[in-house]
Image (cartoon, grey):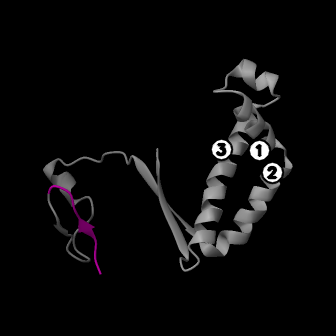
Amino acid sequence: MGRYYNGDIEGKFMFAVQSSNAGERFEAFDIEPQYVEYCVNRESYEHIKKTLEEIEKTGAVKRVKDMFENEVGYNDDIQKKHNVSDSDLSEYADWVLGSKMKSFFDENEEDDYLYYNAEL
């Protein structure tokens, strides 16, 4: 077991001797990550379902879907016309993400984990 580096150069840091920031000695510098890696365990399936149901009970999903069925886009005036708050939009967006997670586990019964990267 060990830690590797890869990119334009590749190799393995010397186990128990070399730090991951050894390149800084040669004026290498950190670049802020552009992605965060996430993992969802199948054991979270019931929690996902429960959270989706809680979001649906707020009515946010229905209000936003109704707005999108009748409008091409949205802005403050359109939101007001359809009684959709910024919070509703946020809840709807989370509901879409959670629905994709649920669908993944529904469609991939042999997989215990779902992995995805999110841009920062």
Structural crowding at the residue carrying mark 1, measured as other residues with C-alpha within 10 Å and reported as few (<14), some (14–19) or many (≥20): many
x 61%, y 57%: residue? 100
The answer to the question of whether label 3 and label 1 lie on touching residues, with beta carbons closer than 8 A, is no
Q: Amino acid at mark 1?
A: Val
Q: Looking at the rendering, which quadrant does residue 60 occupy?
A: top right
Write down the residue under mark 3: 93
Give the image location of residue 56, x and y in percent: 80, 51
Give the image location of residue 36, x and y in percent: 46, 54
Relative to 103, is 91 on the left or the right? right
Provide the residue span drawn in magenta. Answer: 1-8
Write down the residue under mark 2: 56
Structural crowding at the residue carrying mark 3, measured as other residues with C-alpha within 10 Å and reported as few (<14), some (14–19) or many (≥20): some
The answer to the question of whether label 1 and label 2 lie on touching residues, with beta carbons closer than 8 A, is yes
* SS at badge 1: helix
Structural crowding at the residue carrying mark 2, measured as other residues with C-alpha within 10 Å and reported as few (<14), some (14–19) or many (≥20): some
* Residue 30 located within the stretch drawn in magenta: no
Q: Amino acid at mark 2?
A: Glu
Write down the residue under mark 1: 61
